[in-house]
Amino acid sequence: MDTRGLDYTVLVIAIIGAINWGLIGFFGFDLVAFLFGNMTWLARIIYAAVGIVGLYLISYFGRISSMGNEVSN
């Protein structure tokens, strides 16, 4: 099954989430809360989506190792 489109979408969401965490860590500035309000329903959906993306990316480890096996065979 080709999941490249989903993988790129998930990667973009993960990068956006990582940038937000970097802003929080370095400057104490939460971009999601600034744009959508502090823990509004929309902000919570965004936080939940980033969390789900993180869980999805755990499966990426297994696919990366299996891709490496296919190339070497």
Image (spheres, grey):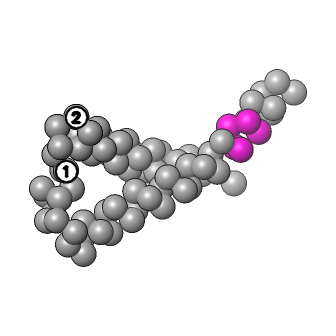
Residue 72 x/y as whole percent? 82, 24
Seen in the picture, residue 26 relative to 36 is either above or below; the reply is above
Horizontal side of 33 relative to 20 (left or right) equals: left
Horizontal side of 72 relative to 32 (left or right) equals: right
| Residue 32 occupies quadrant | bottom left
Q: Residue shown at 55%/56% (left/top)?
A: 55
Horizontal side of 33 relative to 18 (left or right) equals: left
Which residue is situated farthest in the bottom direction here?
41
Q: Residue shown at 66%/42% (left/top)?
A: 61
Along the line of sight, the residue nearer the viewer: 5 or 64: 64
Rendered image: mark on residue 18: none
Residue designated by label 2: 26
Residue 6 x/y as whole percent? 51, 53
Q: Is residue 42 magenta?
A: no
Q: Is residue 65 magenta?
A: yes
Residue range of the region highlighted in magenta in the rendering:
62-66
Is residue 5 visible in the rendered image? The answer is no
Q: Main secondary structure of the magenta part?
A: helix
Residue type at mark 1: give it. Answer: Asp
Residue type at mark 2: give it. Answer: Phe
| Residue 66 occupies quadrant | top right
Dot 2 lies on which element?
helix
Residue designated by label 1: 30
Which residue is situated farthest in the right direction here?
73
